[in-house]
Image (cartoon, helix red, strand yellow):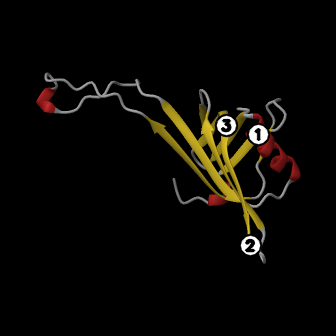
Amino acid sequence: MGAQYGKDLLIKVDLTGDGQFQTIAGLRATRVSFNAESVDVTSLESQGGWRELLSGAGVRSAAISGSGVFKDEDTDERARQIFFDGETPDFQVIIPDFGTVEGPFQVTAIEYAGSHNGEATYELALASAGALTFTAL
């Protein structure tokens, strides 16, 4: 995979629950991380004293964060609604030349900021809230 534009990493939200996803407008920077806890099953009988991990036993999670300026009233309103209602709607993350991750996420933080002579900005953080699917490109 060659170099990619950062602007091609997209975070989309299902605005109405009907499976139609819309890009959260105004994002300038995005980040996606995937994590898996390990379960250590090392014992005195472990070969050569090396640590052993139990395959597939740990909790998996994903986190998404982004920052930018809200440019569209619908996605701004939806992000706030998701946070204040504690909803876990489906989101899509489009990773260029890699694939699409889709599933429920909870908005865990929204931060707004602004300076006297600049635009208002926001930061958004999401945590996976269920099973995610991956579709390769």
Q: Residue at x 57, y 43 (%)?
A: 63
Which residue is labeled 2 in the image?
115
Percent x, y of residue 84 = 76, 39
Q: Of the residues under marks 3 and 1, which one precedes in the sequence?
A: 1
SS for tag 3? strand
Q: Is residue 4 left or right of residue 28?
A: left
Q: Residue at x 79, y 57 (%)?
A: 70
In this view, the residue farthest toward the right is: 73
The residue where tag 1 is placed is 84
| Image quadrant containing the C terminus | top right
Q: Which amino acid is tagged 2?
A: Ser
Kindly report which numbered mark, 3 or 1, lies closer to the viewer in this rendering: 1
Q: Give the camera-side residue of 9 and 83.
A: 83
Image mark for residue 60: none
Q: Amino acid at mark 3?
A: Gln
Q: Earlier in the sequence, mark 3 or mark 2?
A: 3
Instruction: For residue 137, say whether it is visible.
Output: no
Visible in this render: residue 131? Answer: yes
Q: Is residue 130 left or right of residue 12?
A: left
Q: Residue at x 34, y 28 (%)?
A: 39
Q: Secondary structure at mark 1?
A: helix
Residues at circles 3 and 1 in contact by the CB criterion of under 8 Å: no
Q: Mark 2 Cα within 10 Å, few/some/many (few <14, many 20+)?
A: few
Taking the spot 51% from the left edge, 41% from the top edge, the residue there is 34
- Residue tagged 3: 106
Q: What separation in Å lies between label 2 and label 1 (alpha carbons)?
A: 25 Å
The picture places residue 8, in percent across and down from the top left corner, at 66, 55
